[in-house]
Image: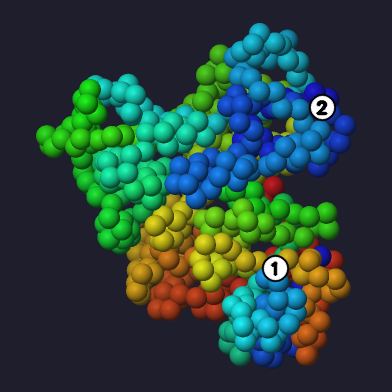
Amino acid sequence: MRYVIIGNCIAAAGAVEGIRSYDQKGEITIIDGERRGCYSRPLISYLLAGSKGAAGLHYRSEAFFARNQARVIPARAVRIDPPAGQLELDDGMMIDYDRLLLATGASPLIPELPGIEHPRVKTLYTWKDAEEIAALVETGATAVILGSGLIGLKAAEALHQRGMKVVIVEKQEQILPRLLSPWSATIALRHLQEQGIQVLTGHQAVSISESGEVELDHGAKIPAQLVIVAVGNRPNQSLAREAGLKTGKGIIVNQYLQTSDPDIWAAGDVIETHNILSGAAEVMALLPLAHLEGYLAGCNMAGQAVRYPGAIFLNAVHFMGMHIIAAGEPNRSGTVLQWQQGSSSLEMTIDGDYLLRYIAINLPGITGPLTAIVEQQIRIELKEWQEFIREPSMASLPAAYWAEMRRWEEHGGLRCG
Amino acid sequence: MRVQSNPEYCLGCGLCRLYCAAAHDGYDGNLLKAFKRGTPQPRADLIVRNDKSWLNTCRHCHNAPCINACLTGALQKDDQGIVFIDSQRCVGCFTCVMVCPFGHIQPSRDSYRVVKCDLCRDQKGIPACVSFCPNGALSLTEEVETR
């Protein structure tokens, strides 16, 4: 059996582990388009900040791939020929496959703005990006970050640590719009401002001049040494589209992570994932899902039939000493409970007897059980949550959670795969 | 393999946590060295609820959610099936804390990495918490969560 994986990131590492759980003999070939090995994308902001060296970036070492007999080819795949079971690389080489995994990931969205091609306008998405930005860092000069999502904030933190003045421009009325509620965003914003980051919400850039001056929609002009564009990402679907696979906003897969071609699977940021809470197939480009999806795809490529039940939105991030963890459905309404003490806060949205979403700031300890309650749809009455939120802690978690946990212990196994 | 906690026998004395802390971070099981001169940190929490108490141990899950979710590759499983963390590679994002359904993994005291049960894999013999529980409330079992 010849397994070929396009992309050498988190999902690929998961797939190698999945394949090797069931097939010790098949040949595994990985096409590494970035030619950097299997590294952890979130760590590039630490590289930029200077708090991690290049050696610390690897998600899985070369020894891991050697041990699993996975051959890594530093090249980019340019075309898939499904009827022939072949893949063409950018150096003209042809690779035969029996089973193919597309782990092609995503790329940053670039807004159409006059001046966006300016050499000091960058994205922070790859290792190479981080190196290019590092070369432009100038202590005391201004960096403008377009977008206040996870990448925007991690870029802001890194450049601040490198001594730059940082201005974040966010189109929405609040920071981290996909992650936080207006209430929690206000808490996070205050923290950012206290750390010396300037934030302009409700504004967007309209142009970037030749001298690097960023003009905003209300006419303000910010002279910038560096502009980081972090306004979202889009799945890299062109290989799949050109090969005739079914695609939507991402590659469409079934519950076994198989595409419309039975010899081709897909995993990670490039696919549409089944959202357990909304019931819809959505692009859920989240690192924690990429490894699991890769692993399950690998198991299935090796002849198993392991189902992927889908996922919920979930994120954990820390910047400038603040830890934010949020999970669940951002767009559904319900009863909102809030708790705040010192620098910690918790917000929960409850619909009927179900927890839809929580946002915990500087309160990580209880988030594991809360995520499980959202994901497994454990039924807990509102009045129990009202009791819990008076003093949120592990010991005060509602009885239904502990009962469910005992059930897991006795019967073994959670709903997954 | 994992440590199972039986609330029926647990007195909530917390000795498990003292010996756990002393078994890690290079204290080599020396309680005096750990607690008089160091900043020891236990790898599991004691939960006290409605007159019952238990040690919230790691289940060392099969297909562990914490390993799937780890951003850096710091969380791994060894040949014996023990889920452990390479602290050098942990950046303290707490993604694993967010996905552990049991709430076992916890932030370290300095808040920039996490700590979890490693079944005292660096020491020989059975885990310290099991050895020193005065009431037999903790035992080492072969059962694994089939997550």
User: What x and y, as percent, mark residue A352?
Assistant: 43, 63
Asked whether the residues under marks 1 and 2 belong to the same chain, the reply is no
| Residue that mark 2 sits on | A27
Residue shown at 78% from the left, 85% from the top? B132
**Left or right, residue A28 beside residue A385:** right
Q: Residue furthest left?
A: A219
| Residue that mark 1 sits on | B117
- Regarding residue A413, the answer to whether it shows in the image is no
Q: Nearer the viewer, residue A35 or A334?
A: A35
Residue shown at 68% from the left, 42% from the top? A60
Badge 1, how many Cα within 10 Å: few under 14, some, many 20+?
many
Q: Is residue A331 above or below residue B18?
A: above
**Left or right, residue A352 beside residue A166:** right
**Left or right, residue A302 beside residue B97:** right
**Quarter of the N terminus of chain B within the rendering:** bottom right
Q: Nearer the viewer, residue B108 or B129?
A: B108
Q: Chain of mark 2?
A: A
Q: Nearer the viewer, residue A139 or A346?
A: A139
